[in-house]
Amino acid sequence: MKDLETILRHTIAAQGPIPVSDFMAECLLHPRFGYYATRDPLGAAGDFTTAPEISQMFGELLGLCLAQSWLDQGAPAPFTLAELGPGRGTLMADILRATRAVPGFLDAAQLHLVEASAALQDVQARTLAGHDIRWKTSTDDLPEEPLFLIANEFFDALPIGQFVRQGTGWAERRIGLSDTGLAFGLAPPQPLPLLAHRLDDTKDGDLVEICPAAPTIAEIIGARIETHGGVALIIDYGDWHSQGDTFQALRNHEPANPLENPGECDLTAHVDFEVLANATPSAHTRLTPQGVFLERLGITARAQALAAKLAGDALDAHIAAHRRLTHPAEMGTLFKVLGLYPSTATPPPGLEP
Ligand code: SAH
């Protein structure tokens, strides 16, 4: 039996079945055995890959989008250039390289990375060697100044609770012990004010997910942006409204049983963007599919420019990467982009209504 599974079994034996959110938090961020705490999970040798690991074009275009927004808002200096959950630091490295071409942008930028995993902080320090970086473990610790922020596949890693509708109450899905391992069960139903608005669009037996940390973080970001100016680009899989069970595990790029091998799999859930948008005092864009966003920012022209320097396998890989980021059958539609910006400013490029 794995060490984290032993710990979880003891906790459940002592306290009773635990909420999915507690299970997810322990599996991902347990200081000794948590998934992110013990490894670099990204890339071909890891369990999953992400847009910045697929192609440099993703970070370049996001960087130029942030820089254009910075210019549109009068080039405030100094400002915070922040990323939530930077993984290997690849996205930030591409942003920093692309925005060297924008006069004044990098001189005014103070880099802040919000990263919970010490192991990944080390990887980020290596990727971004030579840059002056401050690490934070909480969004709340970002400075009170203009904020230009990106979060790619960050919100999907935050723990979610799951609730099954029973009459006008909600039964929380919990994880308990079975003869063979860990098993899902349901707590007795209770009224839940947080889900009162979902009584209109759900029926008996429907499952709704709640990510308690997501609106808190969105509120902090939105407040900084409304007060000091800035933009946040939030990119993830999910939709405007959450409904249904999206709790999933990935191991070696394959779907896995989330209750097996705790701490060894990536656990995620789809993002409910409506909750993020409603939590902020600042304006928000329409939810835009990643493929549409990248096309509007000029990914095809950039892909052609890069392709001109490539041949053979490298060219094939580059063409496949372009397709993977943008095509509706790949990441183009599943992934969405939400922009937050001050109610007095114009929306960021690519996210105009
Ligand atoms: N954005 C990167 C990596 C996504 S993986 C990319 O696109 O490649 C999720 C990242 O969020 C990892 O860096 C993980 O360690 C970090 N993370 C997960 N939960 C976190 C939390 N609660 N606080 C801060 N960082 C967190």
Image: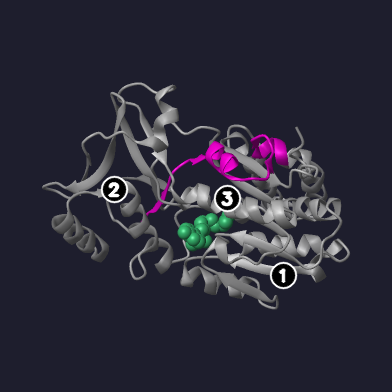
Determine whether the residue tagged by mark 2 lies in a helix, strand or loop.
Answer: strand
Relative to the observer, which residue lies in front, 311 or 252? 252
CB at mark 1 closer than 8 A to ligand 1?
no
**Quadrant in the rendering for residue 146:** bottom right
What segment is highlighted magenta in the picture? 264-293
Q: Quadrant of residue 37?
A: bottom left
Q: Amino acid at mark 3?
A: Glu
Give the secondary structure at mark 3. Answer: helix
Q: Earlier in the sequence, mark 3 or mark 1?
A: 1
Q: Name the N-terminal-most of marks 2 and 1.
A: 2
Q: Residue furthest left?
A: 179
Residue with the mark numbered 2: 19
Q: Amino acid at mark 1?
A: Gln
Task: Report helix, strand or loop for mark 1.
Answer: strand
Q: Are marks 3 and 1 in contact (CB under 8 Å)?
A: no
Q: Which residue is mark 3?
A: 219
For the N terminus, give its image quadrant: bottom left
Alpha carbons under labels 2 and 3: distance apart: 24 Å
The answer to whether residue 306 is left or right of residue 329 is right
Mark 2 / mark 3, whichever is N-terminal? 2
Estimate how packed mark 2 is, as few (under 14), some (14 to 19) or many (20 or more) residues with alpha carbons within 10 Å. Answer: many
* Number of dots carrying numbers: 3
The residue at the point 18 percent across, 58 percent down is 9
Q: From the image, tell me which residue sits under label 1.
A: 110
Q: Position of residue 2 (x, y in %)?
A: 24, 63
Circle 3: is it few (<14), some (14-19), or many (20+) Cα within 10 Å? Answer: some
User: Is residue 278 in view?
Assistant: yes
Image quadrant for the C terminus? Answer: top right
Q: CA distance from mark 2 to mark 1?
A: 38 Å
Which callout, 2 or 3, points to the residue nearer the camera?
Answer: 3
Taking the image as shown, residue 21 lies to the left or right of residue 299, namely left
